[in-house]
């Protein structure tokens, strides 16, 4: 530090020689006092002060922020990591149909012979129309109850009709088969309970049935059989074959 100040002030040659002669007269072990010019001290002090001011000015005085001010977070120059888009939810799996394509496949050979012995012939809605036949007014496939009929329409898949050879007015067994969700079929069963049909457990399923007669004394009735999500709904008049609903269920589930 002293050498830097000496070089910076550059004294005259004569002065240097006098200093050298003076050093010879100084006893060993005694350090001579070097005189630092006042102007050099002022310059150094000013330089240090300016440097401190410059450093302080670069620091933001947070304690001087306005009341209520929120310090913004430091923004990183690196891009944010890509967000993961959640995979779309898988759609609900459709019900795998257990029902055959042909009405003839719903019935055992034994049931077919019994129905044919009563002069009943198997039709579909299309074949019924081809023979210029129609279901008589006041008769409905599956059920005569309007509310239950709407429920049945929501799950219906196949219609199979056994019609008397003498014409639809003589007799018929009108069946609608459908597959539904548990809630749909539970609502249908609740409606059948409310209508007062007899409930029985049969062949691994639940069957509801009723028998009565119309104003002309013709026997009529309904049978509703539920098993493994399938609803076999039958309304009949003139002749009601026993074991009809269970026979259909056995034909379907023996193949499923």
Image (cartoon, helix red, strand yellow):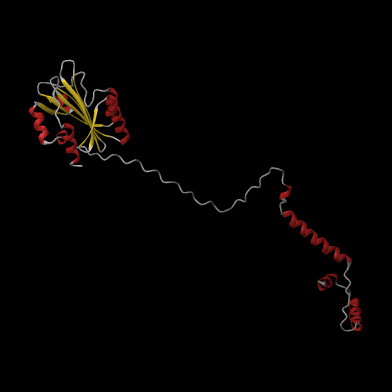
Q: In which quarter of the image is residue 249?
A: top left
Q: Residue furthest left?
A: 117
Tell me where residue 223 appears, x and y as whole percent. 21, 28
Viewer-side residue, 73 vs 176 = 176
Image point 85% across, 65% down: which residue? 41
| Residue closest to the far top | 215
Image point 90% across, 79% down: which residue? 17
Q: Position of residue 104 (x, y in %)?
A: 14, 34
Quadrant in which the C terminus appears? top left
Q: Position of residue 120 (x, y in %)?
A: 11, 26
Asked where in the image residue 173 lies, by quadrant, the reply is top left
- Tell me the quarter of the picture where residue 12 sits: bottom right
238 left or right, relative to 78: left
Residue at 73 percent of width and 49 percent of height = 63
Q: Would residue 242 appear left or right of 9 to someone viewing this image?
A: left
Q: Nearer the viewer, residue 156 or 184?
A: 184
Please, is residue 30 above or below residue 108 in the view?
A: below
Q: Which residue is drawn at 89% across and 66% down?
A: 38
Quadrant of the rendering where the N terminus is positioned:
bottom right
Taking 69 as reference, is 142 left or right? left
Q: Nearer the viewer, residue 93 or 39?
A: 93
**Where residue 135 sits in the image (x, y, percent)?**
18, 22
The tally of labels here is 0
């Amino acid at each position: 530090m002293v050498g830097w100040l000496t070089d910076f002030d550059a004294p005259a040659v004569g002065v240097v020689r006098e200093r050298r002669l003076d050093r010879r007269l100084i006893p060993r072990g005694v350090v001579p006092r070097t005189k630092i010019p006042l102007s050099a001290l002022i310059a150094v002090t000013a330089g240090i002060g300016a440097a401190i001011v410059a450093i302080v000015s670069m620091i933001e005085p947070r304690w001087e922020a306005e009341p209520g001010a929120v310090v913004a977070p430091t923004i990183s120059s690196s891009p944010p990591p890509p967000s993961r888009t959640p995979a779309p939810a898988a759609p609900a799996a459709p019900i795998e149909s257990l029902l055959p394509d042909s009405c003839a496949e719903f019935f055992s050979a034994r049931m077919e012979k019994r129905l044919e012995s009563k002069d009943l012939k198997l039709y579909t809605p299309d074949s019924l129309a081809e023979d210029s036949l129609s279901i008589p007014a006041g008769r409905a496939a599956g059920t005569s109850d309007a509310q239950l009929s709407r429920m049945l329409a929501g799950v219906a898949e196949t219609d199979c009709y056994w019609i008397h050879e003498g014409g639809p007015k003589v007799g018929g067994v009108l069946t609608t088969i459908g597959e539904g969700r548990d809630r749909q079929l539970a609502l249908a069963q609740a409606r059948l309970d409310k209508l007062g049909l007899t409930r029985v457990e049969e062949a691994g399923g639940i069957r509801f049935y009723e028998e009565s007669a119309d104003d002309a004394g013709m026997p009529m009735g309904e049978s509703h059989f539920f098993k493994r999500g399938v609803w076999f709904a039958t309304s009949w008049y003139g002749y009601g074959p026993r074991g009809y609903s269970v026979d259909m269920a056995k034909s379907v589930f023996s193949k499923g």
